[in-house]
Image (tube, rainbow, N blue to C red):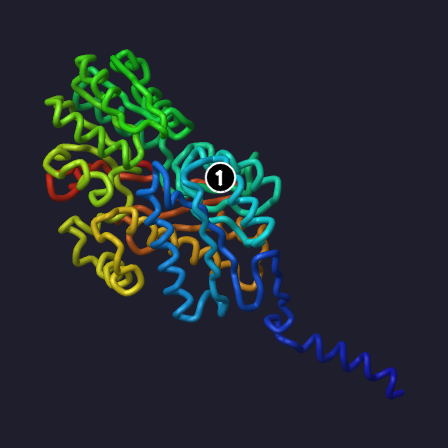
Amino acid sequence: MKHVLAPVAAVLALSLASPLALAQKKYDAGASDTEIKVGHINPYSGPASAYGTIGKTIGAYFKKINDEGGINKRKINFLTQDDGYSPPKTVEMARKLVEQDQVLLIFQSLGTPPNSAIHKYMNAKKVPQLFVATGATKWNDPKNFPWTMGWQPNYQDEAHIYAQHILKTKPNAKIAVLYQNDDYGKDYLKGFKDGLGAKTSMIVKEVSYEVTDPTVDSQMVQLQASGADTFFNITTPKFAAQAIRKAFDSGWKPVHYLNNVSASIGSVLTPAGLDKSVGLISTQYLMDPTDQAFVNDPAVVTWTAFMKKYYPEGDLTDASNFYGWVVAQTMVQVLKQCGDNLTHENVMKQAASLKDYAPMGMLPGIKMNTSATDYAPIQSVRLIQFDGKQWKGFSEVMGK
């Protein structure tokens, strides 16, 4: 009789156990009871090295999180690699992170060409390529690439807003365009032309450059010679600073639109010359810590304290450092939502389940929303103009 009762007692004890006690932890490679391995690829060297500070800010934020006990008692092991903004190197680094280091995910890999090079690989491996640091439209394709998700507003939407502003304020404009000759530059250009619609003939000259070019001076001479009075500057930081400086020094004074990815005062406008940057128009979806309107905002105060403690050598005027802080918060939020189910599948499920999420540092009125059919977290911006000291917002929040 004793032998019969033993299994019955075991079943009874099991049925009375709490659901939490019965919950099983689930892990894929890169996660355990104590650790979460997060991979990252950034151009710490090469033509886009100005963005390297983003990786440093993210690493500093994860250290802060670890100092506070980690995420659900797990420490983040942040493995960051330098690809020099070279797609073949990106492929090498992604393979190392996925196959050798066995990270749970790759987070914030930077640049459209580098991410394009690993796009199919990451999806074939079914490892999250999450919150990539590029606004290319193609990252929002959950049907064909369910393991890749963007973060920032997409380039085509941003360029569309510039085009609409030109049509409204300068309907007879003669437009010159400088763009990087790759997927990033072409994505912006397509959005701009789509925004102009039937008025694409307003573009009187478009010139491209290669990331291997030492300068864009010759391209700027061509654009000025076109007689254009409006200029759309689709460039990464190094070339953006060159273009701003060349336009001013040559006496060309078009209405100058600068893509958001190069709107940093610290890494672009200061090297170009703040006096030479007056009047630039761009977009914004994050607070600008140099804007007097935000200096006393709790988000900027918190970020400043974080920078001074965890990344004291970081430039407080470089928008990339603020960007890195906000996007790192988003990654932490997703990992928190994962709980004890740290599988590749659940990471993507939680990333696609953001509802009106607003990390510290977002502009008022802008929130993140994702779903299984919408992989574009941020879809709103406002127009800003540089006054010689800081960016000033001059439009309502536009977009979704």
Q: Quadrant of the N terminus?
A: bottom right
Asked if residue 40 shows in the view, the reply is yes
- Give left or right: position of 249 versus 111: left
Could you tell me which quadrant the C terminus lies in? top left
In the displayed structure, 259 sits above or below 207; it is below
Q: Residue at x 42, y 34 (%)?
A: 112
Give the image location of residue 87, x and y in percent.
47, 35
Question: Which type of secondary structure does the marked residue at label 1 adopt?
Answer: helix
Number of marks present in the image shown = 1
Q: Give the residue pinned by disc 1.
A: 89
Q: Is residue 44 toward the left or the right of residue 173 in the image?
A: right
Q: Position of residue 150 (x, y in %)?
A: 44, 41
Is 26 situated left or right of 87 in this image?
right
- The three-letter code of the residue at mark 1 reads Lys
Task: Bin the neighbour count of mark 1 within 10 Å (Cα to Cα): few under 14, some 14-19, many 20 and up.
Answer: some
Q: Nearer the viewer, residue 393 or 43?
A: 43
- Vertical order, 22 against 396 (above or below): below
The image quadrant of residue 121 is top right
